[in-house]
Each structure stands twice: as structure tokens, then as C-alpha cells.
Image: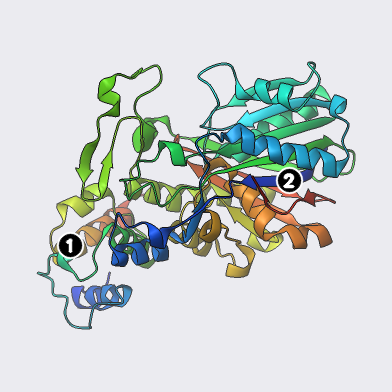
Amino acid sequence: MASFSIQGINIAGIAATVPKTVEHNMDYTYISEKERKSLIKVTGVEQRRVASAQTTTSDLCFEAATKLIDELNWKKEDISILIFVSQSSDYFLPATAVILQGRLGLPTHCMAFDIALGCSGYVYGLSVITGLMHSAGIKKGLLLVGDVSSVICSKTDKSTYPLFGDAGTATAVELTDDAKPIHFNLNNDGNKYNTIIVQHGRGRNRGSPDSFRMEKIAEGIERSKLNIELNGIEVFNFSINEVPEMVNELFRDTQTTSNDYDYLVLHQANRLINETIRKKLGFDAAKVPYSISKYGNTSSASIPLTIASELREQISKNKLRLLCAGFGVGLSWGAVSFTTNKTVILPVLEI
Amino acid sequence: MDTIAIFIEKIEGEFEEVPKGTIKPTTDYRSIEGWSSMQALIVIAWVDSEYGVTLNGEDLQKAVTIGDLYEIVKAHKTTKEQSPL
């Protein structure tokens, strides 16, 4: 069972960047006004940020990382690990983390690699970077997490297009003697790999003229094999069952209850899913922040983006105990609890 | 488990646009005013919190009427209660 604690690591700072372009779901005229209203009510997504054709996830993360390094006054030569977590890398190869190491001007001795995960990616990424830093004694590291999902959504698929927004984030992690342990609980179920999937464009189905052919799947759902497919009901059931179970397991392992946490930061999947999880876990609404109305479901970026957008002021004033849970594509789900300690949170950046 | 009358009364409460007393056990649930894939999620969330059972995609496909839905929820609930776990 992947349930463990890492000692001696502090989250020094978090920054999040979104594209400037705003799309409102009330303007999504592909579906009727009534459907738009119902979609906004259930998913909670009023507007989303959409990257331009020239902007990649790494561009968004680069901006967040640059501003965060400046704000923390970190020396670049001290950063010895960079991990990029995303489902939207720059190239088939090489790894985007390596490109970012060069672009950020980090030393060549800074180890850099990618992790290919989505909605659970922030939690998984934190587990890898804190674990490596702890065991190898690495003093400073950067976790760059985000997704540009808009490019893989078919505009004529009401089950995906109005849900996803684009964002890139940077989390600065440092070794310290003065930190509470960070707890993790990580899970996945590969038998459900096709619940959220892009069928073509990689090894299994490389891509052919057929990949581009638009197919009508159902009323309001028309897409190609290069677009993301999402089985809404299966994702819904998975989320409302597995996430509370995982969090309850973390409660048992750490001998805590919901009262021990200042905030529960959930991956911004959709409002109805998150509210169902919140109620099952017995958290007050005031302890569960949302950024989904402004930014949509931002995949791996949603936890740090929600922290930057909704908890900046609170974190600047107090040490807060946060419980975060990511869940989705894989299927993969993970929870992490950590305590902020002079953690610098930048206001949400735009490019 | 609630009777079907109570089940219907509660489900009507979940649909803002549906006047009380208009849903019958024989009503095709997809024909209910305002029904969409979003309402399907609302019903799943409601059944989960109200009865502690999970309706999957197959269940929803199989069910035609509200009465069918009620029987599926009841069957799931019975199976769950009889399970040793």
C-alpha cells in the first residue's frame, strides 16, 4: 500500500499561471441556453482560460517558475531537481523537464525528468520530489505541474470542451530541519485506463488520416480519435467512491479527522463531484475552496492553482494544515497532507 | 428502503422544473422536463447520498421508467446489505 510519510521538507512557495484569454460557458452556443445553464450549475464552470495556439504547458510553467524563483530570491545554481508533471508535453521527445532546465538557466547538474499524469499528478509529483530530496539530501527543487487541455478537446464535444481550462504551476520545495511530516496515500486502477483517454497519436495507435475523422458519438458529442474521450458517469462514480475512501484511509494512518485540517483542497473535477466528496467526508463548505467557476477543470494544475487563487491571504498569515486530493485520468488518485510554513504564494499570473 | 411513492416524491425534489405529482412509476425518466446528461449525474449523486448505492452507466441504460430505476436501486441496496463486508 502506497501510504507513507516524508520528513524534513518544506513547501517554500507556489505560483500559478493561466492564459489571458477567457472563454465563458454561456457563450458556448454549440448547446442550447438551457443546457448551458444546467451544465454551469452542475459542473460549476462559468469560465475557462484558453491557451493560444503558440502557448504550451511548459510556457505557463516557465512563467510561474521564473516569478517564484525571483520572489523567493533563490540562486539558480542551488536548484538540483526539476520535475515536470503533465499530460501535455512539448514534444513526443525529448522530456519537457529537460527543456525547462535549459530555458530557466538551471545548472546541468540539476536532474530533470517528466512524469506523465493528469488530475492526480500534483500529489504524485510532490511524493516523488520530496522523497528524492529527502533521501538524496537535495536542498532545493522545483515541481512544475500543469496542462493545456483545450487543444485535445473537440469543440463539438459538450462532455469535455466546456469543462477544461489551461494552467501551469510551479511549486518550490526545500530541505529543512523545521517541518512537519508530509503524508501521502497513492492509488491507481489500470483496468479502467479507457475511462479518460486520447486513443490515437502515440505508440498503440500512431495516427493515420483516420485519426482526424470526426465521428458523431451521441447528440452533442462529435470528436476524432485525437480528441480526449471522457466517460462522465464512470468518472463520477469513481470519484465519489474512491476519493472519500482514500482520505479516510489517510485519516486512519495519521490518526487525524477532518477537524485537524484547515482546508481540503480538491482537484477541481466538477462541482457536483466535489460537493458529494466534501459532504461524505464531513468538511464544512468554508473549508473547501473552489477555483472551478473561474478556471474550469485545469487537470494537474488545479490543486496549486486553487491554493494560489483562493488561499493566498490565509497562507500568508498563518501556518495552515492542508489536505489535498487529486483524482482522474489513469485512473489514478492520490492524497497529500502538509503544513504551510512561511510558504510564499504568488497572485495568479497571466500570460 | 423507501416505498416507490416516497422515492418519487424525493426525486421530484431533485428536479427544480418538475411540478409535484407529475412523475409516475411508469414515466420514462429520459422524458422528464429538463432531463440531460447533467440530470443523470444529479440522480447518481442523490441515490449515492440517499441510499448509499452507486448507479453505473449500465444501470441507467437498462432502466426505462422511474419504476425500473427504483427496482435497480432497491436491488443494489439489498445486495449491499447482504454482503458480509
- Residue located beneath label 2 in the image: A14
Is A278 above or below relative to A79? below
Q: Quadrant for residue A334, please give it.
A: top right
Which quadrant is the C terminus of chain A positioned in?
Answer: top right
Compared to residue A140, the image places residue B3 above or below, namely below
User: Residue B52, image x and y in percent?
Assistant: 37, 61
Q: Which residue is mark 1?
A: B30
Question: In what quadrant of the picture does the N terminus of chain A appear?
Answer: top right
Q: Nearer the viewer, mark 2 or mark 1?
A: 2
Residue pictured at 16% horizontal, 80% vertical: B22
Mark 1, residues whose alpha carbon is within 10 Å: few (<14), some, or many (≥20)?
A: some
Q: Secondary structure at mark 1?
A: helix
The answer to whether residue A323 of the structure is visible from this angle is yes
Residue in the foreground of this view, choosing between B64 and A211: A211
Q: A113 or A326: which is nearer to us? A: A113
- The label shown at residue A306 is none
Residue B40 appears at what percent x and percent y?
28, 59
Residue A206 x %, y %: 36, 17
Give the Cα distance between marks 2 and 1.
45 Å
Q: Residue furthest bottom?
A: B20
For badge 2, the amino acid type reads Ile
Label 2: chain letter: A
State how the image is colored: rainbow
In the image, what residue type sits under mark 1? Arg
Q: Which element carries disc 2, helix, strand or loop?
A: strand
Residue A105 against residue B30 in the figure, above or below: above
Residue closest to the far left: B26
